[in-house]
Amino acid sequence: MGAHSDGMSTGITEGFSGAVGGTPLIRLHALSALTGCEILGKAEFMNPGGSVKDRAALGILQEAEASGQLKPGGTVVEGTAGNTGIGLTHLCNARGYRCLIVIPETQSAEKIGLLRSLGAEVRTVPAVPYSDPANYVRLSGRIAEETPGAVWANQFDNLANRRAHYGSTGPEIWQQTGGRLDAWVAATGTGGTYAGVALYLKEQDPRIRCVLADPCGSALYSWATDGTLKSEGNSITEGIGNSRVTANLEGAPIDDAVRIDDPMALRTIYGLLWQEGLFMGGSVGINVAAAVETARRLGPGHRIVTVLCDSGDRYRSRLYDPDWLAGRGLEQPQRTGTALIP
């Protein structure tokens, strides 16, 4: 991923690709004060495509180009809940490829609309489990096979995803903290961000605790805690959680796991907005709430790093709309003088 490294010293990057990565760590003051720990968020919403998925998208394209699979004028096909597709479409525009995205129709209108605005060919499909051949990920793989000159990005099981984070996100966090951190906390959909960073940090210091955050409705919490893939409840968060262990997650170190429900995730993202000025997406609520729980488990005086994946702009009609929330039995948090996270 070294594209951004040369540019960082001069302030000039090589195109869109060169602007991917190099994001700051943001100290979350209110939550750090609440826990007595230092809670830091990697500001991945500051990537040029607006999310952490820019890194995976770039890594996947670079490896496909290097192997000769992806040729000039080719097509990139992917099944995505949104952000990887957005990153891929930006990069395909910049590198001269077509982009075809298969997305579950349950995803936010903002993300689907943005993909179309960016110029992707977008196919919305019913949301069905991975075990169903019509699942969006499996369908995207078949479309890639049938399309001349196409490559399947396959973000869930293509290890270029976690290699991108092993090669960039992990080293950045290590450098930015001066090698002084006690825990890495992240939710996982594909497994790329969590696993790539966890593998890198454990190599630098085996004492760093790697904590998997998971929403309700995902089977990964039970897998991490007792080895069985079983899910409980459901969640409004998009793009994280899974019913299976992906190739990217396979073999990644997991020292602990935290399950976060929707009311807690909502209180967290509203708290980040009102107390930190950060307008964040739903998976950030899972990540930051799990970082707070990890701080409680470790006790005061520790430094914990998590991911601020994307902005709330992609979820305004859902997470920030009281009627949409009420329709799902959830209450919109109200602004008060007290901390939202008890």
Image (spheres, rainbow, N blue to C red):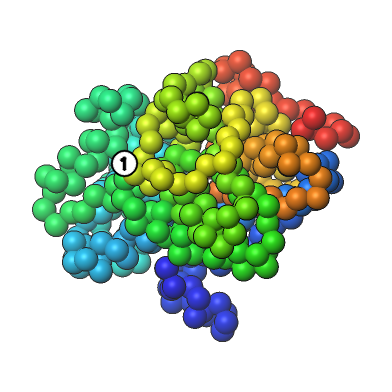
- Of residues 155 and 291, the one drawn nearer to the viewer in this rendering: 291
Task: Judge whether residue 318 can be spotted in this image.
Answer: no
Task: Give coordinates of residue 56: x percent, y percent.
Answer: 41, 55
Task: Please report the residue visible at 81 percent of the width from the left and 50 percent of the height from the top.
Answer: 301
Of the pair 250 and 284, the residue shown nearer to us: 250
Specify whether 1 is left or right of 310: left
Q: Position of residue 257 (x, y in %)?
A: 58, 35
Q: Secondary structure at mark 1?
A: strand
Q: Amino acid at mark 1?
A: Gly
Q: Is residue 316 above or below residue 164?
A: above
Q: Nearer the viewer, residue 125 or 54?
A: 54
At a point 35% along the width and 66% down the height, the residue shown is 94
Counting from the top left corner in percent of width and height, residue 149 is at 14, 57
Q: Is residue 100 visible?
A: yes
Which residue is identified by label 1?
A: 79
Given the current orientation, which residue lies at the most extreme right position? 337
